Image (cartoon, rainbow, N blue to C red):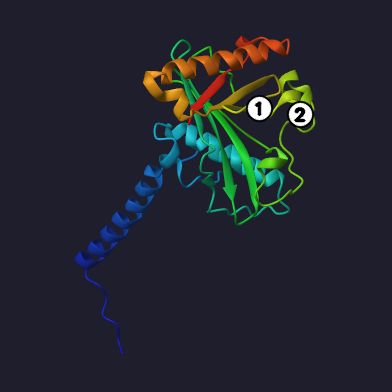
Amino acid sequence: MKIRELEPKQKIIIVSIIVVFISLIVLLFLLLPKNGYGSGISVNNYDKYIKNLPTDRKNSINSALYKIVATNSQTDNINVNDATIRDGSAKYSYDRTTNVNSGSFIVDMESIKQSYMISYEWSSDSKNSNLSGYSAIATCLASADFIYGEFGCVDSFANSKSYTERDPILKYLPYSTFNLSVTANVISNDRVDLNVNIILYSSDTRDGQRDISIAKYKTEIVEWIRSLGLNPDDYLIIYSIK
């Protein structure tokens, strides 16, 4: 049976359709958001806990998470789709004086039974001299924070200063009283931030005393740091009121 050849007009139509189809695929590829920081593990619930986090910072965090998972995994095939921010772990602070946003959270990945601390900072001014230079860092958790058990975690600081050598205050943490709890957020080898939870009871809030009580406990934290022979001004203190 002889196959009828396509007419020139039909050929033009078919070629045009193919060109349009390929062009659409290329355009879609170009428009897809890219992580300029390299491979990343997406955290699924940013918007639930950190509503104003820029896309660039999410990309930076995703990349930091991927790198530490790769460091602590036995395989090059990293495929994690269930990374989530642990409920109650997200801390955030904005310093109007320096125009720096900073925060931290614990990310859990049940599929690989691993968890890490994520610390990040950003500013609306990309050239802000108050930025530390660390857009996002992923570090190992303290043993008490593991929910899947120990897995021999190693982070980028493992071969530099030991954990307690990074800052003297780490020897005294975690610290807690009836109304306060203080934990460390290790940002870099030379920087440690403090996460402070202030717990208010009915006796602290009655008769319009809430703000006075908060101020009192903040002063208590500052005095506690001074009692250790350390300077409170050396630390970014991120307060959370409960």
The residue carrying pointer 2 sits among few (fewer than 14), some (14 to 19) or many (20 or more) residues within 10 Å by Cα, namely: some
CA distance for labels 1 and 2: 9 Å
Q: Is residue 79 visible?
A: yes
Q: Quadrant of residue 155?
A: top right
**Kind of residue at disc 1:** Val
Per the image, the residue denoted by label 2 is 163
**Kind of residue at disc 2:** Tyr
Q: Is residue 36 visible?
A: no
Residue at 54 percent of width and 23 percent of height? 238
Disc marking residue 105: none
Disc marking residue 186: 1
Task: Examine the rendered structure and indicate whether residue 8 appears above or below residue 120.
Answer: below
Q: Position of residue 175 (x, y in %)?
A: 67, 27
Residue at 46 percent of width and 25 percent of height? 203
Q: Position of residue 3 (x, y in %)?
A: 29, 82
| 97 sits left or right of 164 in the view | left
